[in-house]
Image (cartoon, rainbow, N blue to C red):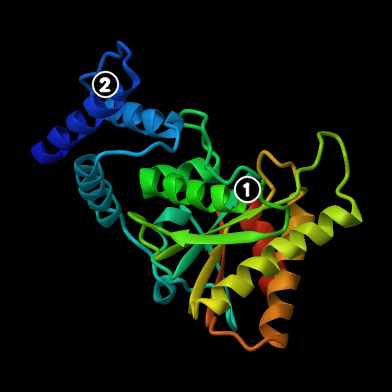
């Protein structure tokens, strides 16, 4: 059952964003449709300044949503081999030190309303501040993010403390991943691991970088991911005690399970 307070918060957030756009947008009566409209408006909003009162209400609303989930910590994951762990589910349900976001070179999140990419999912659950922080980073950098590099931000209303954003290589349709593409994907994992270690993080969850709209072959990407992380943990002093390979699709789960644990 939806709390009355949640409805009031949702109505306030919607009215603010609609007024900001100066458009005639009808607010639906159904809660789920109303919630989807909020996400869509957040998705398309440019990283412009925003009222503190809006952020206060948004944070209460999104944090309540996060806390209403069955959050998963490292102690709840029962598939592991040493420091390497495997978990299937929504990465925003993970209560770990940091989760990895597969970003694009603009590093501002996905602007396609309700798109199901992980960049959209993470920004939508985190809140408007995540795009604002990414925008500050990119303006200071004054250029697009390089493929294979990474940046760390706060996680705001997510269950994790931080988000590490990395830009993976994109493979044209009907093309094979080149050696350069493989090296760049390897660099994504190393860059994230180095940032996590530099911030003294204990747990880090990776998504399947580049295997969605960037078309990197799933088997090859998983092999690079496991090999790179395993070698980093063996060859470097690091604060990390748990590195989670987070998958969402059954196919990816089977691939990682075979790589980590055999048949």
Q: Residue at 78% of width from left, 58% of height from top? A: 184
Q: Earlier in the sequence, mark 2 or mark 1?
A: 2
State left or right for residue 53 relative to residue 187: left
Q: Quadrant of residue 12?
A: top left
Mark 2 and mark 1: Cα distance apart in space: 31 Å
Q: Quadrant of residue 34?
A: top left
Q: Secondary structure at mark 2?
A: helix
Whether residue 262 is visible, yes or no, is no
Residue 257, percent from left and from top: 65, 65
Name the foreground residue: 226 vs 14. Answer: 14
* The disc label shown at residue 19, or none: 2
Q: Secondary structure at mark 1?
A: loop
Q: In the displayed structure, would residue 10 be above or below residue 230?
A: above
Label pair 2/1, CB-CB below 8 angstroms: no
Circle 2 packing at 10 Å, graded few (<14), some (14-19), many (20+), is few
Question: Which mark's residue is nearer the viewer, 2 or 1?
Answer: 1
Circle 1 packing at 10 Å, graded few (<14), some (14-19), many (20+), is few
Residue 50, percent from left and from top: 31, 38
Q: In the displayed structure, would residue 115 be above or below residue 205?
A: above
Q: Residue at 9% of width from left, 37% of height from top? A: 4
Q: In the displayed structure, would residue 18 be above or below residue 184?
A: above
Residue farthest to the top?
Answer: 24
Quadrant the N terminus occupies = top left
Residue 101, percent from left and from top: 55, 54
Residue farthest to the left?
Answer: 4
The residue pinned by badge 1 equals 142
Residue 8, percent from left and from top: 13, 33
State left or right for residue 217 relative to residue 48: right
Whether residue 245 is visible, yes or no, is yes
Q: Residue at 68% of width from left, 73% of height from top? A: 229
Q: Quadrant of residue 21?
A: top left
């Amino acid at each position: 059952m939806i709390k009355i307070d949640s409805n009031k918060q949702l109505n306030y957030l919607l009215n603010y964003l609609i007024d900001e756009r100066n458009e005639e947008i009808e607010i639906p009566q159904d809660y789920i449709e109303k919630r989807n409209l909020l996400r869509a408006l957040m998705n398309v909003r440019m990283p412009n300044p925003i009222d503190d009162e809006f952020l206060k209400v948004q944070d209460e609303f999104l944090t309540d949503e996060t806390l209403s989930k069955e959050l998963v910590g490292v102690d709840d994951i029962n598939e592991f081999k040493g420091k390497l762990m495997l978990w299937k589910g929504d990465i925003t349900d993970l209560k770990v030190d940091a989760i990895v976001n597969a970003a694009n070179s603009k590093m501002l999140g996905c602007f396609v309303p309700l798109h199901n990419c992980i960049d959209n999912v993470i920004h939508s659950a985190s809140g408007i501040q995540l795009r604002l922080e990414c925008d500050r980073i990119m303006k200071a950098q004054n250029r697009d993010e390089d493929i294979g590099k990474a940046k760390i931000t706060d996680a705001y209303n997510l269950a994790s403390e931080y988000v590490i954003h990395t830009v993976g290589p994109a493979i044209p349709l009907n093309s094979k991943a080149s050696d350069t593409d493989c090296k760049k994907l390897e660099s994504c994992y190393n860059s994230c691991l180095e940032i996590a270690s530099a911030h003294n993080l204990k747990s880090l969850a990776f998504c399947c970088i580049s295997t969605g709209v960037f078309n990197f072959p799933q088997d090859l990407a998983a092999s690079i991911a496991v090999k790179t992380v395993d070698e980093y943990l063996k060859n470097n002093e690091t604060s990390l005690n748990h590195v989670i390979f987070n998958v969402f699709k059954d196919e990816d789960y089977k691939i990682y399970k075979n790589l980590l644990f055999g048949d």
